[in-house]
Amino acid sequence: MKTNCKKAVDNIRAYIIRNITVENYNYNQPTNFKEAAKIIVDCFWHEYMHGYNLKRNHQECFVDWLSGLPSVFDSCYYYNRSAVDDLGSILEETEEEKARYNDTQAADILSRLIYREITKATGRY
């Protein structure tokens, strides 16, 4: 499935909602995707971008932030969960289709898809 088809977008958004964790923050549990996206962007800004050179590519900074395992979002696909399996589940891929990626490539694609959806939802960056 293509990453920009409606089903893939819905799956990415559901994945984001399933993996947000606000218990260590002063936020209420989000009830919809737009709220979840705003919380993630706010945390990204305060934890990573605050004080950094704002001329840096925000998508690259976001991917770097996710690889550091922020506590607001479960991005363990970088370290102890298969990014290939997570991405394959989102895109509803077969084992043969998932074999196109290694974990590093899948983690990068997954993080970029997350970035794409939260920026569309919030209108930031």
Image: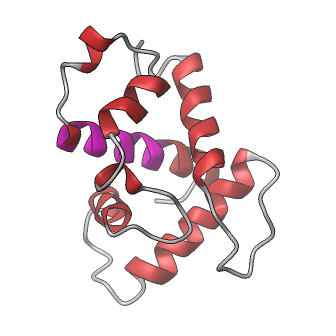
Toward which corner of the image does residue 122 lie, by quadrant? bottom right
Toward which corner of the image does residue 47 lie, by quadrant? bottom left
Q: Which residue is farthest front?
A: 80
29 vs 77, left or right, is right
**Residue at the image position 78 percent from the left and 47 percent from the top:** 32
Who is closer to the viewer here, 80 or 67?
80
112 within the magenta span: yes
Q: Is residue 108 above or below residue 39?
A: above
68 within the magenta span: no
Q: Is residue 95 above or below residue 73?
A: above
The part of the chain drawn in magenta is: 104-116
Who is closer to the viewer here, 123 or 37?
37
**Residue at the image position 40 percent from the left and 16 percent from the top:** 2
Q: Is residue 1 above or below residue 107?
A: above
31 vs 13, left or right, is right
Who is closer to the viewer here, 71 or 46?
71
108 vs 49, left or right, is left
Where in the figure is residue 60, as x and y percent of width and height? 27, 59
Q: Is residue 84 above or below residue 119?
A: above
Where in the figure is residue 19, as x and y percent of width and height? 58, 51
Most common SS among magenta residues: helix
**Residue at the image position 77 percent from the left and 58 percent from the top:** 30
- Location of the N terminus (image quadrant): top left
Q: What count of labels does the image hold?
A: 0
Where in the figure is residue 58, as x and y percent of width and height? 34, 62
The image's colouring method is secondary structure
Where in the figure is residue 7, as x and y percent of width and height? 58, 18
